[in-house]
Amino acid sequence: MTHGTARNIFIFGSLLMLGILVWLSIDSVKAIEKNTPPVTSKVEAGLKVWQKYNCIDCHTLIGNGAYFAPDLTKSYSKRGDAFLRAFISNPPKPMPNFQMSDEELDDLIDFLRWVDGVQTNGWPPKPLIQK
Amino acid sequence: MKYSSQRVAYPYLLLAVALFALQIVLGLVIGAQYVWPDFLKDVLPFSQGKAIHINLLVLWLLLGMMGATYYIIPPESKREIHSTKLAMVQFWILTIAGLIDAGYLMAGFSEGRKYLEAPWPVDIMIIIGALMFLYNVGMTVLKSEKKTSIQAVLLTGLIGLSVLFVFGNVMVRNANFSIDQYWWWWIVHLWVEGTWELVVAALTAYVLMRLTGIPRGHIEKYLYLEVALVFLTGILGIGHHYYWIGTPKYWMMVGGFFSALEPVPLALMVWNTFQHLKESKTVPTNKVALNWLVIAIIGNFVGAGLMGVVHTLPIINQWTHGTQVTAGHGHMAFFGAYAAHIIAVVYFVLPEMRGVTNTFDQRSGMRSLWWMNLSMLFMSLTLMAAGVVQVYVERISGVSFMLVKNTYLTGWMIMRLVFGLTFTVGVLEFVYDFIRISKSKPMEQTLQNIVTGSFSSSGGAAATRR
Ligand code: HEM
Ligand code: HEM
Ligand SMILES: [Fe+2]
C-alpha cells in the first residue's frame, strides 16, 4: 500500500465513520427522548442538585460514575420515596450529610424517579441466583 | 536541541510532572478510603478526592502533550516556534485555570460531570489556551517548507480533541440526563480512543525516528494506516458506551462489532515498533527514553486493547458495566497509553535540552520504569480480579453492594493500596530524576563535542538526523 492510499483511507474512512456517527446520534437523541420519561422542571432541577453535590464521584447512575457507593439507577423502585428521603437527610457513614433544603431534596427524589423510568435495555440484569 | 524556542516545552513538562505527583497523592488518599471509609473523611470526602485525582490526570496529560508538541514542532518544521511569548502567556493561563479548578474542587464544588467537574470559567480558559496553542503550532507548521506526515497526524489529533471539547461541553448541558451522558462520551471516548491516540502516535513516530536513526520514510510508512484504523474502529466503537443509557438497541451490534476491532491498530503499533527496533543498526545512547517508549506502546495495547476488549461485548458488559473491572481497565489504559508516553517524551526531551544525552545517569530512569509499570500492572490486575468477584457475588448472586464491598472486596482493596505505594516509589524516583537532569550541566558533552569536532546537538541516536 502506498503512502497516498493510506492517507486517503485515513481521510475518507474517518469522514465516513464520523458521518455515520452523526447520523446515528441524531437518531439516538430522538430515541432517547422516547425512551425516557418527560423531563419536568422539577426533574431538571433535580439533575442540577445531583450535579451540585457531585454524587457521581461516589455513585454510578445508569452505570456511569464511581464505584465507591451503589448504583442508583433503580433505587427509586427498590427503596421508595420515604426511604430515600430519610436516607439522604441522615446518611450512614461515610456518606456526607449535604444538609439539602427541602426543595432540593424534593427535586432530587423526582430526578431519581425519572432515572428509574429510563428504558435501559434491561440493565442492571436480575441476579441469576434468587434469594 | 537545535532551535532555542524548543525551550518553552520545559515549563509545560515541569508542571505536568508536578501535577502527576499530586494526582498520585490523591490516588493514595481515595485508595485508603476504600479500605478505611472514614480516613480523612471530614477533610476530603471521597467524591472530592476522586474529582481532583482525575482532573489533575487529564490536565497534566494535556500539558504534557502541549510541551511535547512545542518541543518537536520546530525540528519537524525546520524553524522556530511562531511566538514563544504567546506560548508563555498560554502557559500561565492554563496554570491559573488549573489552580482555580483545584481550589473549586477542594472547596467541595462541582459541575457534576465525571472528568468535567471544573467550573465553566475554567473550561473557557482552557479553550482560550487551546486556541492560542493551535494558532501558534499551526502557524509554525504552515510556514514550514516541507510538510510531514508527523505534523499532519499530530495537528489532526490536537485540533480534533479541541473541537470535541468545545462541542461536547455545549451539548452535555441538556436537561435530559441520558442525552447529557450521550454527549459526555463524545469527549471521554472520542478523546482516549480517537484523537489522543493520534497525538501519541505522532509523538512516538518522531521520538522513535530520532532514537533509532531510521529513515523518515520507514517510520512514516505505517503511520497513516495505524491512525486510519484507530478512527475506523474507534469512532463507531463509542457504541460500547451506548448499550444501557436509554439509547436504541442497534448500538449493541454497532458498538460491539467496532469496539471489538479496536485492539487491531494498537497491535499493529506494537508490531511496527519491533520491526523498527530490528531494523535499527545503531544503539541509542538514550536507552531509558527508548525503553519507556516501547513500554508505553505495549502498555497501550495491553491496557486499552486487551483490558478493554475483554468487557466490550454487550453480553459481558451487562455484568461488568460500572464495576471494579472498569476501574482496572481505566488505570492500565490511562497509565500505559498516555502517562507512560508522556514520561517517555520527558526522558527524550530533558537530557537533549540540557545537552547531556550522552552522559546522564540512566539508572534512576530504569528503576522508575520497573517500579511504576510493574505496580500499575499488578494494581489493575487486582482491580479486574476484584471486579470479577464483585460481578459474581453482587450482580449474579444478588448480595447487596455495600456488603460485598465491605467483605469480599476488602482484601483486594488492601492489595491495590499496596501496589499504589510501590507505584509511588517509582513516581518519587522519577520526580527526583526530573529535578536532577534539569539541574545537570552539559560539561562533558561540551568536551566531547570539542574532541569530535561536532557542535550540533545530537539526538541521542549515533546516526545523524534525517
Ligand atoms: C497510587 C496510585 C493510585 C491509586 C491508589 C489510585 C486510586 C484510585 C481510586 C481509589 C479511584 C476511584 C475508583 C472509583 O471510582 O471507585 C481512582 C480512579 C481513577 N484513577 Fe487512580 N489511582 C492511582 C494512580 C492512578 C494513575 C497513575 C492513573 C493514570 C495514569 C490513574 C487514573 C485513574 C482514572 C482514569 C480513574 C477513574 C476511573 C474510573 O472511574 O473508571 N490513577 N484511582
Ligand atoms: C488508551 C485508550 C483507552 C483509555 C485511556 C480508556 C479508559 C477508560 C476509562 C477511564 C473508562 C471508564 C470511563 C468512565 O466511566 O469514567 C473506560 C471504559 C470502557 N472502556 Fe476504555 N479506554 C481506552 C481504550 C479502550 C479500548 C480500546 C476498549 C475496547 C476494545 C475499551 C473498552 C472500554 C469499555 C467497554 C468501557 C466501559 C466499561 C463499563 O461499561 O463500565 N477501552 N475506558
Ligand atoms: Fe470507550
Image (cartoon, rainbow, N blue to C red):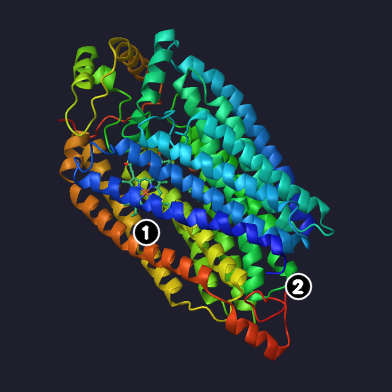
Q: Are marks 1 and 2 on the same chain?
A: yes
Question: Which percent across, then down, holds residue B166?
Answer: 61, 33
Q: Ligand 2: give its quadrant.
A: top left
Asked if the residue at label 1 sits under 8 Å from ligand 1, the reply is yes
Residue B321 placement, left or right of A76: right
* Residue B164 image point, x, y percent: 61, 36
The residue sitting at 27% across, 17% down in the picture is A77
Q: Which mark is residue B466?
A: 2
Chain bearing tag 1 is B
Tag 1, which secondary structure?
helix
* Quarter residue B448 falls in: bottom right
- Residue A46, quarter of the rendered image: top left
Left or right: residue B306 versus residue B409 is: right
Q: Read off the residue under disc 1.
A: B376
State the residue at coordinates (55%, 48%): B62
Label 2 element class: loop
Q: Amino acid at mark 1?
A: Met
Q: Decide: is B38 above or below A41.
A: below
**Which label was assigned to residue A23?**
none
In terms of depth relative to the viewer, which is nearer, B183 or B26?
B26
Extreme residue toward the right, this view: B145
Q: Residues within 10 Å of mark 1 (few under 14, many from 20)?
A: many
**Image label count:** 2
Q: Tell me where residue A125 appears, x and y as whole percent.
A: 31, 31
Is B232 displayed left or right of B45 in the figure? Answer: right
Q: Position of residue B223 (x, y in %)?
A: 67, 59
